[in-house]
């Protein structure tokens, strides 16, 4: 259980952590990284995965659009005429 909390916190993950995060086997993730299918980089001779890039990649592959927050300015009230 503590290991799962650690995965959620880490930005850069190794093969084992990233495979657990994605819910696939380490062998499959290694093959995907070698083929350039998932965003990954090598540090020395070991694959590393940035959580933010994996999240963006999953959103892209699943068709999820990035949420754009649009600021709406409140309309100004019209001046009230004088009471008679």
Image: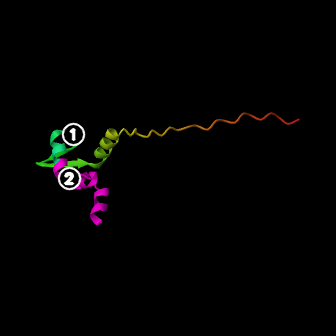
Screen quadrant of the N terminus:
bottom left
Magenta-colored span: 1-29
Looking at the picture, tell me which residue is in the foreground, 82 or 54. 54
The label number, if any, that marks residue 67 in the structure image: none
Residue closest to the eye, 50 or 26: 26
Q: Is residue 83 above or below residue 22?
A: above
Q: Residue at x 72, y 33 (%)?
A: 78
Position of residue 61 measured from the top left corner of the image (x, y, whole percent): 31, 39
Identify which residue is drawn at 66% across, 35% down.
76
Name the residue beneath numbered marker 2: 25
Which is more toward the observer, 55 or 71? 55
Horizontal side, residue 43 vs residue 9: left or right: left
Q: Residue furthest right?
A: 84
Instruction: Work out which quarter of the rendered image holds the C terminus and state it.
Output: top right
Residue appearing at x 50%, y 37% in the figure: 70
**Mark 1 highlights which residue?**
37
Q: Secondary structure at mark 2?
A: loop
Q: Earlier in the sequence, mark 2 or mark 1?
A: 2
- Name the element at disc 1: loop
The Cα atoms of the two marked residues, 2 and 1, are separated by 15 Å
Tell me which residue sits at (74%, 34%) in the image. 79
Residue 54 at x, y = what percent? 28, 45
Residue 34, position as x, y percentages in the image:
15, 42
Q: Residues within 10 Å of mark 2 (few under 14, many from 20)?
A: few
- Residue 40: x percent and y percent? 21, 44
């Amino acid at each position: 259980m503590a290991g799962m909390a650690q995965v959620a916190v880490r930005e850069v993950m190794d093969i084992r952590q990233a495979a657990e995060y994605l819910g696939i086997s380490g062998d499959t993730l290694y093959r995907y990284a070698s083929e350039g299918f998932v965003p990954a980089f090598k540090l020395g001779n070991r694959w590393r995965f940035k959580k933010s890039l994996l999240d963006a990649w999953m959103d892209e592959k699943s068709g999820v659009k990035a949420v754009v927050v649009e600021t709406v300015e409140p309309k100004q009230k019209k001046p009230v005429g004088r009471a008679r």
